[in-house]
Amino acid sequence: MTGTGGAGLSVDVRVLVLSGSARTGSLNTQLARLAAEVMVDLGATTEVLTISEFETPGYSQDVEDSTGFPPGAQRFKEALLAVDAFLLVSPEYNFSMPGVVKNIIDWVSRFRPQPFQQKHALLMSASGSMAGGNRGLWALRIPLEHLGVRVFPDMFSLAQAHRAFSENGELIDDQLENLLRSTVAGFLDLVEASKHYPCLKRDWVEYLGEPFDDRSGAVNRVDAASVGTGVKRVMSSPGSGR
Ligand SMILES: Cc1cc2nc3c(=O)[nH]c(=O)nc-3n(C[C@H](O)[C@H](O)[C@H](O)COP(=O)(O)O)c2cc1C
């Protein structure tokens, strides 16, 4: 599903809406579609996709070194680079994220430049449980924030999702529908503001203390004195000529 908004936002805000479930009849995909409709209402441009569009083999550095990136990872990278922000609506599996979601994050994190950097993200979940899958979202924040994603502080988790939707796909509970709307609106306002004021801190540091990786071009070592100042100084390795 693709939608183009026209009102509300003063600049075009493009959002990739991704459901972390490939299941037919997925509650998370249902929530993703509803959230995308709200985004379009508010003036954003969205595309709704599910994780099945980005199928990849389990990450292996041997595979990466021998055959390169699988098509699913390439597609995700391109989808990410084409937008300002993404909404990830993910099921909770065993108090964490599904393996397929972590797998695509791992694959895509290997591209250079690393495409998650500076993207804004909003996280949502749906589950039949009373917690609505919210614990999985806390697990998701860790790799995403590590990769430089600006993860929106508010999240939306739909509890008892199997009985939350009306026949036309809206939320039966008006309070929840309003909460969904205000969460999405707050997120889009922030993304829009960041397009107006592109002066937010942009530095991204991968693994402090690790040597410079010539192959990937990752900046791994940073002068400790510059951390947090917005000024990054890459340290020279003895004999490396850097
Ligand atoms: C392997 C597995 C682990 C699960 N673990 C949790 C869990 O920790 N918490 C939870 O609320 N639901 C859990 N569930 C239930 C899912 O949240 C539920 O199946 C949900 O509908 C899946 O999302 P979907 O409908 O979008 O496919 C688990 C389901 C599976 C298959």
Image: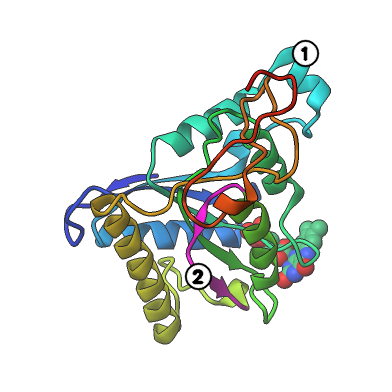
Question: Is residue 150 within the magenta segment?
Answer: yes
Q: Position of residue 132 (x, y in %)?
A: 64, 74
Question: Is residue 135 within the magenta segment?
Answer: no
Q: Position of residue 94 (x, y in %)?
A: 81, 64
For the point 76% across and 61% down, the residue is: 93
Element class at badge 1: helix
Q: Which residues are magenta?
A: 147-159
Q: Amino acid at mark 1?
A: Ser
For the point 65% across and 24% down, the residue is: 216
Q: Is residue 45 above or below residue 76?
A: below
**Number of residues whose C-alpha sits closer than 10 Å to that of mark 2, classed few (under 14), some (14–19) or many (20 or more):** few
Q: Quadrant of the N terminus?
A: top left
Q: Nearer the viewer, residue 76 or 237?
A: 237
Numbered label attached to residue 66: 1
For the point 75% across and 62% down, the residue is: 96
Q: Position of residue 121 (x, y in %)?
A: 48, 55
Disc 2 marks which residue?
Answer: 153
Q: Amino acid at mark 2?
A: Pro
Q: Of marks 2 and 1, which one's residue comes earlier in the chain?
A: 1
